[in-house]
Amino acid sequence: MTALLDIAGLKVDIPGRAGTLHAIRGIDLSIKAGECFTIVGESGCGKSLTAMSVLGLLPRTAILSAERMSWKGQDMRRFSRRQWANLHGPEIAAIFQEPMTALNPVLTVGDQMIESFVHHRLGNRKAALARAGELLERVGVVPVERRLAQYPHEMSGGLRQRVMIAMALMCQPKLMIADEPTTALDVTTQVEILKLLKELQAEMGMALLLITHDLGVVAHMADRVAVMYAGEIVETGSVTSVLTRSAHPYTSALLDCLPTRDQPLTPIPGVVPALFGELEGCMFRNRCRFATEACADPVPARSVGEGHVYRCLLEANEVAV
Amino acid sequence: MTRLLDIQNVSLAFRQRTGLFSPPNLIPAVRSASLHVDAGEVVAVVGESGSGKSTLAKMVLRLLTPDTGTIAIDGKPAQSLGPREFARLVQPVFQDPYSSINPKRTLAEIIQTPLKIAGGVSARECEERARDLFERVGLPMRLFHSYPNQISGGQRQRVAIARALILRPKLLVCDEPTSALDVSVQAQILELFNELKQDFGLTYLFISHNLAVVERVADRIAVMYRGEIVEQGETDAFFATPTHPYSKMLLSSVLPPIPGRPLPTVSRDFELNTPRGSQP
Amino acid sequence: MTGLDTTVTANRFLRIRRGLRHAGFVLGAAVLLLTIAVALLAPVLAPHDPLAQNLSIRLLPPAWMEGGRPDHLLGTDHLGRDYLSRLIYGSRISLIVGFSTMLISGVIGATLGFIGGYFGGRVDSFVTYIINCRLSMPGLLVALAVISLVGGSLFTMIMVLGLLFWDRYAVVVRTATQQIRNADFVSAARVAGASAPWIIWNEIRPNVLHHILVIATLEMAMAILSEASLSFLGLGIPAPTPSWGLMIAEGRQHLFAKPFLVWIPGIAIFVLVLATNLLGDGLRDLSQPEGRR
């Protein structure tokens, strides 16, 4: 199965008053149709920016470069504004963390939902509303008639998130990007929303790029996962191999610092380094208990098992899980 | 032994003005909550948004006054304590590291604030105590005179903790102290809380929605739902055999980082029996 | 100790450096400082006594025009008084009125704003009521009315303007206080036993200060303009004290023959008010990044 989204060597630099921030420093990413790919990392690692790159929504001052960045074979690096606009909706759709700011407070739910559909000439207003109604029903926002006429502030956080999901599905996208979709929700609501996403994925044969900091969400949703740290993907692989047979010290350190009853809590000492200036070698070395002098040199990508790639000098089985 | 914190049948409803001539709407936030914390314990109050846990915390901190019921701190009614007396018993640690410290003051000044308010200590001694705490919470001395915008979220939270400790309180009321932090930073702060508990002989009232954290740090747990405490008990017993349907629902929603399991089924049946059940 | 203190100085240094890059701020500040210097050094700078009349040389044009004399660079007015000297001394009036009004109205407005914003509820309703009363009054007309009753003088003008022009302070401070009031660091101070005045002064005021400064400069510009207008109408500084507004009024009769009598003080007012406004805008722009995290 060919990849829908194929990215290699993606770099994003953001010039600013303090210098140029190397926010993303060469990542490879490929998503196949129908799969759920998760990017997990902590704040500042660049995961949200990756989503923005795929959507063509980087800040205007940002400088993007990539060896390869294609959507269904088309070169995204050369996309014009119109081509990006054609992509949003029928090809790629997105939902974000904070539904209150993602939804337009002065438009009714119905009006917002049909915007994209009508814009992409997929049907007239009547057809659009019919589809909106169908989708709202499917995501559980009922009664449909009433909800279509409501404003975002009249709904709870969970309902708004469902509306966002329905809105994203209006043009039947091949890929949905969800950036921390459940972080602002209660845990019980989170489970329902995640379930909904999974079901929709199966029903519509849609690929899902899920961005999160929560390893529990990763474990329950992902087919494949990429662990990001300081602008780089340090480990990629199937969710089972990455979480149970972690090859990179950061991944296992992250798993270790999750609070559980029996194990002692082992925090990760130190802080993420600032991504300015010349950056060479492994960015985790100032916090890694396995660090050696060799870690200051560029670290190659290494493979362990099928599709499981990581960037570290250690052998995979030296990292205790 | 007197309980350090004793909350008895406390209720609070928020008043929403509906117009010039109509009576205000009463929105109950906490209903008849009773809870106690003994010295040296860590008691966690868990719940989701709208459960009333933050409101309860604010009442313990005397930021809100309960409509009915009593709150006693170290045996005395909370209302009867003078401001200085109260401050030496109870101190807060809040959730948002960005709004919990004054952006226009240096870290040194922030930490000394409660001591300056209390008065009676020379400026030099204030600063000395602040320095000690600064180091104790794991912050590098070169940052002592920095401003909040120069430090990270985790570091700000440490500053907030140092500030909370400068009056040597007995009880720390922590309202979601690690929810806004990254997982790795959260682990550091939780470890800090643990060390400080031993060193300073502290007692914690820990508000959280994160059950994994609570399982780790709490001796006892109270679960709140729509303003009521629906279940209370020892942590181990609670996690092993929860009794209330909401507790079960909450526990089943926790997603451990173990792959290969399906998403849990969360049943909302019991909501039909509770007031104002509506889809989230 | 040097290592510890560098971060503090670094902060202030960065702010000053950033300030110096902002054109409006620099220009405004420069002109204002220049005017202050001129006002302070008036006895030294002014070539003649501004009140000294000499009818034999009345209505002389400025030195660069035909008929002008180098010892009266800006000419003379209808009573033969040196215009340059009157202009220089006139700056004192503008600045005194500007600063005094700014301070008085600032204290009144900010206090009301803090009280309303912090306490909320009935107290705030009362404060809002007072603000609304003030806003429904046409400020300058009330000033006119009061001064006509009481008689014009420097003191009266400062009092009237100060007691009237506090509304912008009050509104802005009130809103800003309301926003900060709910911040956790305020709650922390309350738990620590701080009284309301303590919190307002120590926790809220530093976060509202930049707003107050911006309003202050803009109010100063308003005050200078108001003084000029009132003096022009004859209800401000009484003659013979040189005030730029008064100079315009006195020159009005000779507008067609000797226009310089009007446009010289006119330009002075314009430049000073523009500079003050630029300074205020600059302060507002510069204080923006502080709002960001």
Image (cartoon, coloured by chain):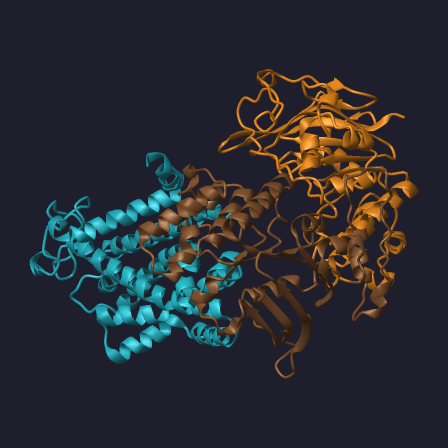
For the question of whether residue B127 can be seen, the reply is yes
Q: Position of residue B213 (x, y in %)?
A: 68, 48
Where residue A260 appears, as percent x and y from the top left, is 71, 43
**Nearer-the-camera pick, C48 or A43:** A43
Q: Is residue B123 above or below residue C246?
A: above
- Chain in cyan (letter): C
Chain A drawn in what color? orange
Percent of width and height locating residue A266: 64, 37
> Which residue is more in the foreground, C109 or B58?
B58
Q: Please tell me which residue is depicted at 27% across the width and 66% down the height of the picture.
A: C232
Residue extending furthest toward the front: B1
Rendered residue at 62%/43% (across/down): B186
Left or right of B147 in this view: C263: left
- Is residue B102 visible to the viewer in this orientation of the structure? no
Return the residue nearer the eye: C176 or B169. Answer: B169
Count of marks, rendered view: 0
In-front residue for pair C115/C60? C115
The residue most toward the bottom is B21
Considering the image in quadrants, where does the N terminus of chain C appear? top left
Question: What is the drawing colour of chain B?
Answer: brown
Measured from the top left, where is residue B71 in percent x and y? 58, 71
**Is C257 rendered above or below residue C68?**
below
Determine whether A164 is above or below A286 in the image.
Answer: below
Side of C49 relative to C171 (left or right): left
Q: Residue at x 66, y 53 (%)?
A: B218
- In the rendered view, does B116 fall on the left or right side of A317? left
Q: With B277 as the anchor, is B131 left or right in this view?
A: left
Q: Residue furthest right?
A: A203
At x 8%, y 60%, the residue is: C52
